Image (cartoon, rainbow, N blue to C red):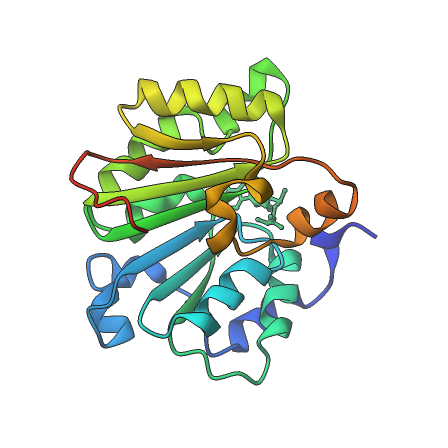
Amino acid sequence: MRLRNIPGAIEIIRKHPNYIAEPENYRGKWAEYFANTNPLQVEIGSGKGKFITTLARQNQNINYIAIEKFAAVLLKLVKKIKDENLTNLAILHEDAENIEQIFEPGEINKIYLNFSDPWPRKKHAKRRLTNIRFLEMFKKLLSDDGVIAFKTDNHDLFGYSIEQFELAGFLMDEITYDLHNSPLAEYNVTTEYEEKFISQNMPIYALIAYKSNTHPKSI
Ligand SMILES: C[S@@+](CC[C@H](N)C(=O)[O-])C[C@H]1O[C@@H](n2cnc3c(N)ncnc32)[C@H](O)[C@@H]1O
């Protein structure tokens, strides 16, 4: 059975208290939604949500938004936090293509891209979330001290992404070809995909890209 065909997925997601049906209504007003001015961090392509739900539990003083385009995958995420009252997490059923309708420029402090689909065929390069078209959109939405954290198992996508981050004017000084044996490992929270690659002893590639050199490099 293809995941996306699970009947009733959208109805179940819509009933979950963390789900936001019309996120464009909160554009520029996410602080109002969360009723505080805590930093805002967004994961794009959250999948089944292990990463973002772990962070939300660990850091009550940070607001998190999970964006995922497939309802059947989101269903797994909402089931994961079924009876938890995670007031610092919002869940959006959206395509990253629409992100500028959801956030105002400068509104996001950190974006996570975890094991983004590689779209290996050249003719699909524009669909990669680290394509310059997306990176320029994300850059606008980040605060001046904002960052993007990217990790992947895919060597080709990693090389391509480094080039695209450079072209989009990001600064990078934490690039690793073995995340789990690097200084970044101390802060690393794993995703579902990452767990799979760890069990296969595959290296994980990761980088932190800074919008500007005003960032204190401590996130
Ligand atoms: C390879 S999975 C990784 C999932 C999760 N981040 C992990 O590491 O376990 C990529 C996820 O990104 C989602 N995705 C891909 N393109 C997207 C887009 N344009 N907007 C929102 N989600 C997207 C896919 O539906 C899928 O769930």
Between 152 and 142, the one lying in front of the other is 152
Image spot of residue 167 (x, y percent): 32, 18
Residue 75 visible in this rendered orientation of the protein: yes
The x and y percentages for residue 192 are 66, 54
- Name which residue lies at 24% across and 67% down: 38
Q: Is residue 194 left or right of residue 93?
A: right
Residue 143, can we see it?
no
Most distant residue in the top direction: 122
Task: State the image coordinates of residue 97 (x, y, percent, origin top left).
Answer: 41, 39
Name the residue rendered at 65%, 47% in the picture: 194
Judge from the rendering whether residue 97 lies leftward or rightward of residue 121; answer left or right.
left
Image quadrant assignment for residue 132: top left
Query: Which quarter is ligand 1 in?
Result: top right
Q: Is residue 123 above or below residue 209?
A: above
- Residue occupying the point 44% across, 69% down: 56
Q: Quadrant of residue 152?
A: top right
Q: Residue at x 30, y 23 (%)?
A: 168
Q: Is residue 152 left or right of residue 96?
A: right
Along the viewing direction, whichever of 61 and 113 lies nearer the viewer: 61
Total numbered badges shown on the rendered structure: 0
The residue nearer to you, when weighing 182 against 135, is: 182
Q: Nearer the viewer, residue 31 or 202?
A: 202
Classify residue 20 as left or right of residue 25.
right
Q: Where does residue 85 sit, x and y in percent of width and height?
A: 47, 84
Q: Can you say whether 34 is above or below 116 in the image?
A: below
